[in-house]
Amino acid sequence: MSQFGNGEVGGDNHWTAPVHGTTADGQDVTASFGTDGRDGEALIARGHADSMGGFYGSSGQKGHDHFGPDGEPYGDRGQSD
């Protein structure tokens, strides 16, 4: 099984597989990018998530924030800065 966060595990028909990255300020993040009707949207979490459950979460307990094409918050759950 591939390690989570390397772009090879997870995602679905609307989201790319999550990847680990670092912001310009040096903060670790995990991100997934929208496709197929969600182009320009992003799911972002603070830190390098180590599991799909930790990143995607479950109903009412999402492990990421959701941003629109212009950076507007679609779902601010306090998971990113």
Image (cartoon, rainbow, N blue to C red):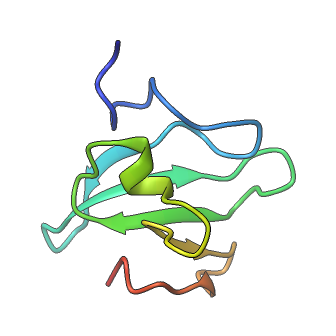
Number of callouts in the render? 0
List x then y, in percent, for residue 63. 42, 66
Which residue: 53% across, 63% down? Answer: 43
Which residue: 55% across, 61% down? Answer: 58
Which residue: 87% across, 54% down? Answer: 37
Which residue: 28% across, 25% down? Answer: 3
Q: For the view shown, which residue lies furthest in the right direction?
A: 37
Q: Nearer the viewer, residue 56 or 13?
A: 56
List x then y, in percent, for residue 55. 41, 55
The image shows residue 45, relative to residue 37, as above or below, that is below
Q: For the view shown, which residue lies furthest in the left direction?
A: 26
In the rendered image, the quadrant that contains the C terminus is bottom left
Q: Residue 54, located in which quarter of the rendered image?
A: bottom left
In this picture, residue 70 sits left or right of residue 44: right
List x then y, in percent, for residue 31. 43, 54
Q: Nearer the viewer, residue 49 or 70?
A: 49
Q: Residue 15, located in which quarter of the rendered image?
A: top right
The image shows residue 81, relative to residue 12, as above or below, that is below
The image shows residue 58, relative to residue 10, as above or below, that is below
In the rendered image, the quadrant that contains the N terminus is top left
List x then y, in percent, for residue 44. 44, 65
In this picture, residue 62 sits left or right of residue 36: left
